[in-house]
Image (tube, helix red, strand yellow):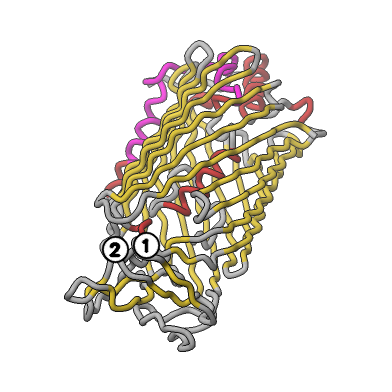
Amino acid sequence: MQLKKEPKSVRGALALATCSLLAGTSPAHAAKEWEVDSAVLFYSEGSDRISLVEPVVGLRKALGDDEYVGMRIVIDALTGASPNGAIATDAVQTFTTPSGDSSYTVQPGETPLDPSFKDHRIALNGVWEKPLSERLKGVFSANFSTEYDYQSMGVTATLARDFNNRNTTLSAGASYSADTIEPVGGTPVGLASMPTVPAVKQTQGASEDKTVTEFLVGITQVLNRRTLMQFNYTHGMDDGYLTDPYKLLSVVNSAGNVSGHRFEKRPEERTRQTVFWRTLHQFTEDVLDVSYRYYWDDWGVSSHTLDTRYRYELGGGHYLQPHVRLYQQSAADFYRFSLAEGATPTHASADYRLGDMTTTTFGLKYGFAVSEDKEYSMRIEYMNQSDDNRRFEDVDAIIVQASYSFLF
Amino acid sequence: MRMLIASATLGLAMVQSGCAFEPVQPWDKDVLAQRKMQLEGYPLDTYLDDHIYFSKEASSGGQAVGGGGCGCN
């Protein structure tokens, strides 16, 4: 083990200059100008399902000496129909809307989709990056988001300490958010039957709360002049109303026919953990970005996520970046495709997102970096979600994103 | 908890053995300073991807903590 003295004079000045570069902004313009990062995302699952348009703007400005303030504004506009959790049958099915004042029908053989789904969301984020000492940096942020039936407020703090001539960074972070949901038509009693109009559903109140607490420890290591590696461990705890008040389960009788529907019910606590590894490596000019995450929780869900991007430089600032993401999860313990008549589970959900599932994403991004601060890009991706037990219908989505970053 | 201890041990080992890696001097960090080599070089791409997969899968997180909640039906 060899301990090195801190660089002084010219070396020290170079170290400071490099550090400023690593922060992503050169000091010459940072004092005056805002870094603007903007994007619009289009997401579509096809004509009869969810579509989303999501413009985002991020702003960041240096206050001096590696201190920054920033903010992000996001607007979501969602339309379309979402699976309500019930199964397809060979007869016409009738469902009551969440508000309870109307109904909709689903044709034989079709996956039941709730067409009353429509939402707008606004999310704001403010961030303050502050050097706390020569080697210690703090990043503090606050989040607020609102949609017509859901509000969320949260705070996050992350500390990062450099070691080994700034080749190693240890990070520790914590976040807390408090969310409130006000389901349309009130919160249904979990596992109670869905009524038929004009009967009204059994409710347990007008609104419900949940809190989300997360912790992170991580290490980032410069392996050599062209390679950077990161390891993180995160631990999260969700507490409160974690059920989706709009999801149903089909009740199936001994003859194999659907005899009714019940509202889902999930546990009120969830403990989640992840280990995450990521490596960035630059070849002559091209960059390979690969990451792997293992996730597990006390609902019985575990998953593997492998994400790979390869940035292929075309010359003159133009680049192409293929992207492949592979994700596979195991089902939650209380996931049921349907419920047997007379069954009395403590918890049950037929939300396909809690089932045995594989997501595959292929994408391609084209970018034109005019300079380190000004860049245009466009990406298109295809995402497929399929049931590993081949019971629910595949979800196919197209994702298109246009981005522009510049100084203002 | 075992994973936490393993991660912490790995982290401490990496800090203690900084000289096991090829040390990179500040004036050799021109490549690492480029935007395409930053862990958060494209924060909006990361944000939007996280939002999509948070809404469509049972797993979330890993890269950071917090970020704002949503109903995400």
x then y, percent, for residue A195: 41, 83
Q: Which corner quadrant holds the C terminus of chain A?
A: top right
Alpha carbon of mark 1 to alpha carbon of mark 2: how far? 7 Å
Numbered mark located on residue A351 in the image: 1
Magenta region, residue range: B7-35
Q: Is residue B32 magenta?
A: yes
Residue marked by disc 2 = A335
* Residue at the image point whose x is 42% and y is 32% from the top: A324
Q: Is residue B15 magenta?
A: yes
The residue nearer to you, when weighing A346 against A223, is A346
Residue that extends furthest to the left in the rendered view of this protein: A254
- Amino acid carrying label 2: it is Tyr
Q: Which corner quadrant holds the N terminus of chain A?
A: top left
Asked if residue B48 lies left or right of residue A195, the reply is right
Q: Chain of mark 1?
A: A
The residue nearer to you, when weighing A162 against A180, is A180
Numbered mark located on residue B39 in the image: none
